[in-house]
């Protein structure tokens, strides 16, 4: 899933004011509680240390054998500085009676308040992230190549993060700029001040320069305070090249996550760092959509599946906790390490809607974490607390620059157009927009395909600003499609087209299907009672009512990411007679403007092109 991206640089330390706010977080259950916290573990007052490679939130008074370390973490922010709209700005919560409710969540003004409140009373506090801090961002950040998000993360006192796949949307050079600072190479400086870059290190242990064979950024970072040392190793998923545009990962090699973490865990151990946390931009799929479900019921880690499970089971026991991401899910699980010992694995959903608060008990005698007393829980970034004034000022400053572009109306809708479901109304709308654009470029265009991961937010009926209900602004359209892909046309045989549809549920997409969103006229049946490629019923595939002819040629519109074979659709990369068009956002905007008006707004498509059998 391509987008706009990245960040990294040496650490400067700053101190923001602490807001006195009521702690309004909702706590999930879940933790490693095999033994009680050592009685001598201590907590205490606030402040900042500054020794070694990292700094602590606190200053020491007395030192016992055991020291509690607070680890605050989040992941997949994707430049969502303002509260996300629609379902992207809500989380589901299990109530004591077993029912569920949704809670509005997210927005860095609230995230800052919650994190600052959580740090109070914790003498040793670290804030870490699991990648995708930037990329696929709303217009407020994406328009400025995510400089606003890096500034916000600096003010949030983020200590360290791994890279994610979206940190590579604009390539390694842009990632280095966001880390180290400097004005954009083509657009220059957006203000009268030179962009300073990130105050926190981006870690990229498994991302190597093809020529030097060395990591493009630091592989690890060590936090030190009052004799306590915690090492952090950061990796992104090995499969990053398959979900990022080819240009974004040009000249880079992505190595196995487990092998890389185990390698650097040994190196940290040799340096005397025995407490280690892995920041992994890869994740799992929880058994429940509620953030506070019991992930360890009926047994440890039974409530989560997906890639992170095997990764967690194979990472060396020298690593004490895993902060994960990528799947945008919420979980706090214990998954046994290779020695059979429980180990905490966390993920805090996405878009700044949750943060995880983990207590690691450090044993000064051994320099390691007493893992049996690790505790962890996800907390909601509710919007019923005061906004952090410094974040409000930051948002207002960048909004002033973005408003003339972002506030322009581009269309009108009768209701929310959502991106949820196997086939979504918004997915159909975007595919129709790309088909219409394709026909303008070449009347022989037959259909359009859209990857679901490229649809980043719903279109909401309620006004996001002063534009009025039902008005779609350029900023809202940008948030839906922020990747700056082009709409490309390619020729495929009917047999290739059938194979593309089967690749949705086979090969690399078999375990986690990626169902393409399809334009009007294309229909078929998806039988989920079957397995693999058989889930796409070949005889059901129709285009404008007629069966797809395996020997005929079809002209297909798709974004450049898909046309290049992204998301595991290798057959899409094999098309011929390619024509490269304008960017996909322009095609979407053009379609909205041409097909809606204040007097005749656009209704959500019925999302009835794919018949799903369960």
Image (cartoon, rainbow, N blue to C red):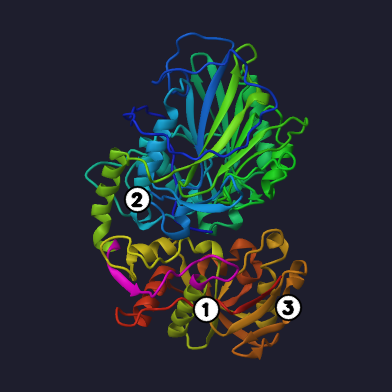
Q: Which mark is residue 185?
A: 2
- Is any atom of residue 247 visible in this view? yes
Question: Residue beneath label 1, please?
Answer: 606
- The mark nearer the N terminus, 3 or 2, is 2
Quarter of the image with the C terminus is bottom right
Figure quadrant of residue 156: top left
Is 594 positioned to the left or the right of 51 in the image?
left
Kindly state the secondary structure of the residue where label 3 is placed. Answer: strand
Q: Give the dominant element type of the magenta stretch: helix, strand or loop.
A: loop
- The mark nearer the N terminus, 1 or 2, is 2
State which mark lies toward you, 3 or 1: 1
Question: Residue beneath label 3, please?
Answer: 537
Q: Height in image: 43 above or below 501?
A: above
Question: How many angstroms separate mark 1 from mark 2 (CA)?
Answer: 44 Å
303 or 52, nearer to the observer: 303
Is 330 positioned to the left or the right of 535 in the image?
left
Figure quadrant of residue 464: bottom left
How crowded pointer 1 is (Cα within 10 Å; few <14, some 14-19, many 20+) is rated as: few
Residue 75 is inside the magenta segment: no
> Are the residues tagged 3 and 1 within 8 Å (C-beta)?
no
Quarter of the image with the N terminus is bottom right
Q: Which residues are magenta?
A: 406-426
| Position in image of residue 463 (x %, y %) | 32, 64
State which mark lies toward you, 1 or 2: 1
Return the residue found at the far bottom. Answer: 546
Kindly state the secondary structure of the residue where label 2 is placed. Answer: loop
């Amino acid at each position: 899933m391509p987008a706009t991206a990245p960040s990294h640089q040496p650490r400067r330390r700053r101190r923001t004011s602490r807001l006195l706010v009521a702690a309004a977080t909702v706590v999930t259950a879940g933790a490693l509680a095999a033994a009680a916290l050592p009685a001598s573990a201590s907590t205490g007052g606030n402040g900042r240390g500054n020794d070694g490679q990292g700094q602590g939130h606190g200053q020491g008074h007395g030192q016992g054998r055991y020291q509690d370390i607070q680890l605050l973490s989040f992941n997949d922010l994707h430049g969502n500085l303002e509260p996300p709209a629609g379902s992207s700005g809500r989380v589901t919560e299990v109530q004591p009676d077993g029912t569920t409710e949704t809670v509005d969540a997210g927005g860095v003004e609230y995230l800052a308040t919650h994190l600052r409140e959580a740090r109070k009373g914790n003498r040793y506090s670290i804030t870490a992230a699991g990648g995708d801090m930037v990329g696929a961002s709303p217009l407020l950040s994406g328009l400025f190549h995510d400089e606003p998000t890096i500034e916000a993360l600096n003010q949030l006192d983020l200590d360290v993060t791994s890279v994610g796949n979206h940190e590579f949307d604009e390539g390694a050079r842009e990632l280095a700029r966001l880390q180290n600072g400097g004005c954009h190479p083509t657009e220059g400086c957006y203000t009268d001040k030179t962009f300073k870059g990130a105050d926190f290190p981006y870690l990229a242990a498994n991302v190597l320069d093809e020529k030097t064979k060395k990591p493009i950024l630091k592989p690890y970072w060590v936090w030190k305070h009052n004799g306590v040392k915690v090492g952090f190793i950061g990796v992104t998923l090995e499969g990053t090249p398959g979900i990022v545009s080819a240009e974004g990962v040009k000249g880079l090699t992505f190595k196995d996550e487990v092998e890389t973490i185990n390698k650097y865990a040994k190196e940290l151990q040799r340096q005397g760092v025995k407490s280690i946390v892995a920041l992994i931009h890869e994740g799992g799929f929880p058994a429940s959509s509620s953030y506070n479900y019991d992930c360890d019921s009926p047994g440890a880690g039974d409530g989560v599946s997906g890639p992170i499970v095997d990764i967690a089971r194979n990472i060396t026991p020298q690593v004490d906790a895993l902060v994960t991401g990528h799947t945008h899910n919420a979980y706090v699980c214990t998954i046994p390490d290779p020695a059979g010992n429980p180990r905490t694995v966390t993920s805090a959903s996405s878009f700044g809607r949750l943060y995880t608060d983990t207590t690691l008990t450090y044993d000064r005698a051994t320099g390691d974490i007493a893992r049996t007393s690790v505790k962890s829980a996800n907390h909601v970034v509710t919007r019923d607390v005061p906004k952090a004034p410094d974040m409000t000022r930051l948002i207002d400053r960048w909004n002033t620059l973005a408003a003339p572009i972002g506030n322009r109306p581009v269309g009108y809708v009768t209701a929310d157009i959502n991106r949820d479901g196997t086939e979504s109304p918004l997915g159909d709308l975007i595919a129709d927009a790309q088909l219409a654009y394709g026909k303008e470029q070449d009347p022989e265009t037959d259909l359009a395909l859209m990857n679901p991961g490229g649809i980043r937010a719903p279109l909401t009926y309620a006004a996001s600003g002063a534009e009025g209900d039902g008005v779609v602004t350029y900023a809202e359209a940008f948030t839906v499609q922020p990747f700056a892909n082009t709409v490309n046309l390619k020729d495929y045989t009917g047999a290739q087209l059938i194979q593309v549809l089967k690749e949705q549920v086979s090969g690399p997409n078999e375990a986690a299907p990626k169902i393409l969103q399809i334009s009007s006229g294309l229909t078929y049946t998806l039988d989920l009672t079957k397995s693999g490629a058989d889930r796409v019923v070949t005889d059901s595939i129709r285009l404008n009512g007629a069966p797809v002819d395996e020997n005929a040629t079809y002209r297909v519109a798709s974004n450049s990411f898909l046309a290049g074979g992204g998301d595991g659709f290798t057959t899409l990369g094999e098309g011929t007679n390619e024509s490269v068009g304008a960017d996909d956002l322009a095609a979407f905007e053009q379609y909205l403007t041409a097909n809606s008006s204040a007097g005749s707004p656009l209704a959500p498509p019925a999302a009835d092109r794919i018949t799903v059998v369960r």
